[in-house]
Image (cartoon, grey):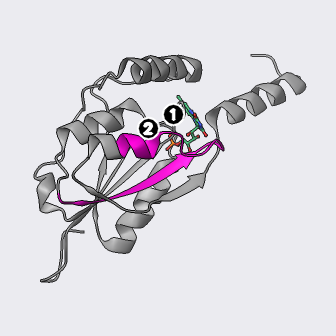
Amino acid sequence: STARRAGDTKVLVAYYTRTGNTRVIAGQIGRALGADVFEIRTADPYPEDYEEQVAVAQQQRDSGFEPLLAATVPDVKSNETVFLGFPIWGMTAPSVIRSFLSQHDLSGRTLVPFITHGGYGLGQSLDVLAEHAPRARLVEGFSKQCDQERETLQEVTNWLGRINVRG
Ligand SMILES: Cc1cc2nc3c(=O)[nH]c(=O)nc-3n(C[C@H](O)[C@H](O)[C@H](O)COP(=O)(O)O)c2cc1C
């Protein structure tokens, strides 16, 4: 919603997701606060294949690469508060989150992370936010353990092996 009362502060909810877990939280924050919701996307799509994605994520993490964004938020500075959501990849924030923070100056703004992970916790992700948005006011975020794609794929593979159906 863009309708606001005088005195309201503008809130943006920006998030990145691969399998949708983080999107559920983004949608709930957006509805609860009447905030604009922006899905962060890379200009070049990531692999659909899980193992290929793990390899690309690791390579981009280790090299410090910042993938090009498909789009940026116009006038991000008009927002007093920015919620930033992402999954944990390789014990840290996905490299596209570093791209987002490099491309959007959040100086003097309140930055609220919301993070999903597969059970191994937040890793280095909060350090990444502090380093790449050094002049934002980083407040306590929300985090939740969610399904791991790896586990779902393995369970489906096991099940297909048990039933007697051949493609
Ligand atoms: C490339 C890749 C790397 C991941 N690395 C981790 C990890 O280091 N620790 C962890 O707990 N979960 C890891 N996960 C699991 C995701 O963080 C978890 O499933 C998350 O909820 C996915 O969010 P999404 O559905 O919004 O993409 C990884 C997933 C992917 C695809």
Q: Which disc is residue 89 wearing?
A: 1
Question: SS of the residue at dot 2?
Answer: loop
**In the displayed structure image, the side of residue 115 where residue 120 appears, left or right:** right
Query: 11 or 142, which lies in front?
Result: 142
Query: 151 or 141, which lies in front?
Result: 141
Question: SS of the residue at dot 1?
Answer: loop
Cβ–Cβ under 8 Å for marks 2 and 1 = yes
| Picture layout, residue 26 above or below residue 43 | below
Quadrant location of residue 69? Answer: top left
Q: Quadrant of ligand 1?
A: top right
| Cβ at disc 1 under 8 Å from ligand 1 | yes
**In the displayed structure image, the side of residue 76 where residue 37 appears, left or right:** right
For the record, the magenta segment spans 108-129
Q: Which disc is residue 141 wearing?
A: none
The residue positioned 17% from the left and 53% from the top of the image is 107
Query: 120 or 11, which lies in front?
Result: 120
Which residue is under mark 2?
93
Which amino acid, by three-letter code, is at mark 1?
Trp
